[in-house]
């Protein structure tokens, strides 16, 4: 089984795609820009949505405006910008981009793209470093290569729609995310606040409460003058 040559085998026309979807000259339907279509691979980039809590029960995505941050040793799901529709006799595999991993420590998990897939791929991305990594919208994430299947059978369409939230991320969610991304900052603020409160308490005690306590511990002046002197001789 050899890797399929992609250059010259893509189209944006649904008519051309449907006409050749069962033939040996079948095409990959995609809206990818020309610079994303390489000789033997289709390059994938950061799209419109992402999630740090993606699961089978929650597939909603936050909208990406300019970019998104991955915490150190954490993973997120990012929706690829490129739409892909696969014919019935092609099978794809998503591979990580070596340059992104070598330069920034970000690794895209391998994934399969089955025949009759239609939509945008959602990719699990891992930050293997202990530092936060910022990915910009449109940045290259990985590649998908295709193979020809040994036989052609009608496959059940696999439709993957976009589930990006139309609502902006809430203030509470932003704060929660900021605290999770910047633990050293808010821990430092907390320690400084505790330290400042402790210093203020000590200063207040030294200036005010200590003087008050010393004053309260002294007997009244009249009582001091009424007490006999130790050297005074009592009359017989």
Image (spheres, rainbow, N blue to C red):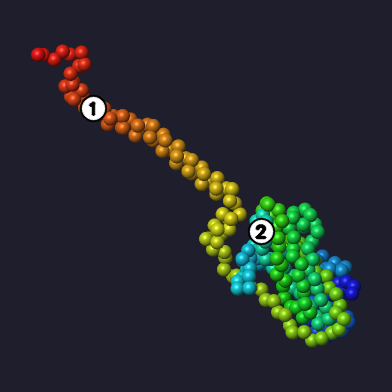
Image location (x, y in percent) of residue 83:
74, 73
Please tell me which residue lies in front, 46 or 65: 46
Please tell me which residue lies in front, 176 or 164: 176
Which residue shows up at 18% across the image and 25% down it?
Answer: 223
Residue 177: which quarter of the image? bottom right
Q: Would you say residue 231 is visible in this rendering?
A: yes
Give the numbered dot on residue 97: none
Q: Distance between the residues labelled 1 and 2?
A: 67 Å
**Of labels 1 and 2, the one closer to you:** 1
Going from N to C along the chain, the mark reached first, 1 or 2, is 2
Q: Would you say residue 16 is visible in this rendering?
A: no
Image location (x, y in percent) of residue 60:
61, 71
* Circles 1, 2 touching at the beta carbon (< 8 Å): no
Q: What element carries label 2?
A: loop
Which residue shows up at 84% across the image and 84% down it?
Answer: 152
Compared to residue 120, the image places residue 46 above or below, namely above
Compared to residue 154, the image places residue 106 above or below, namely above
Which residue shows up at 47% across the image and 40% down it?
Answer: 196
Q: Is mark 1 on a helix, strand or loop?
A: loop
Provide the residue designation for mark 2.
74
Residue 175: which quarter of the image? bottom right
Give the numbered dot on residue 219: 1
Image location (x, y in percent) of residue 131:
68, 51
């Amino acid at each position: 089984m050899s890797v399929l040559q992609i250059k010259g085998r893509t189209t944006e026309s649904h008519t051309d795609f449907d006409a050749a979807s069962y033939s040996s000259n079948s095409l990959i339907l995609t809206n990818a820009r020309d610079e994303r279509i390489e000789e033997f691979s289709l390059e994938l980039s950061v799209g419109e949505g992402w999630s740090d809590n993606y699961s089978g029960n929650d597939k909603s995505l936050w909208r990406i405006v300019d970019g998104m941050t991955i915490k150190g040793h954490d993973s997120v799901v990012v929706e690829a910008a490129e739409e892909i529709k696969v014919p019935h006799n092609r099978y794809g595999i998503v591979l990580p981009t070596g340059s992104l991993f070598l330069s920034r420590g970000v690794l895209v998990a391998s994934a399969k793209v089955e025949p009759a897939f239609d939509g945008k791929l959602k990719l699990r991305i891992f930050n293997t470093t202990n530092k936060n990594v910022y990915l910009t919208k449109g940045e290259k994430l990985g590649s998908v290569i295709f193979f020809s299947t040994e036989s052609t059978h009608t496959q059940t369409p696999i439709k993957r729609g976009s589930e990006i939230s139309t609502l902006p991320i809430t203030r509470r969610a932003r704060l929660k995310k900021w605290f999770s991304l910047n633990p050293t900052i808010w821990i430092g603020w907390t320690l400084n606040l505790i330290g400042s409160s402790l210093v203020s308490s000590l200063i207040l005690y030294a200036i005010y409460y200590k003087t008050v306590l010393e004053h309260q511990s002294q007997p009244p002046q009249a009582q001091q003058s009424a007490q006999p002197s130790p050297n005074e001789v009592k009359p017989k």
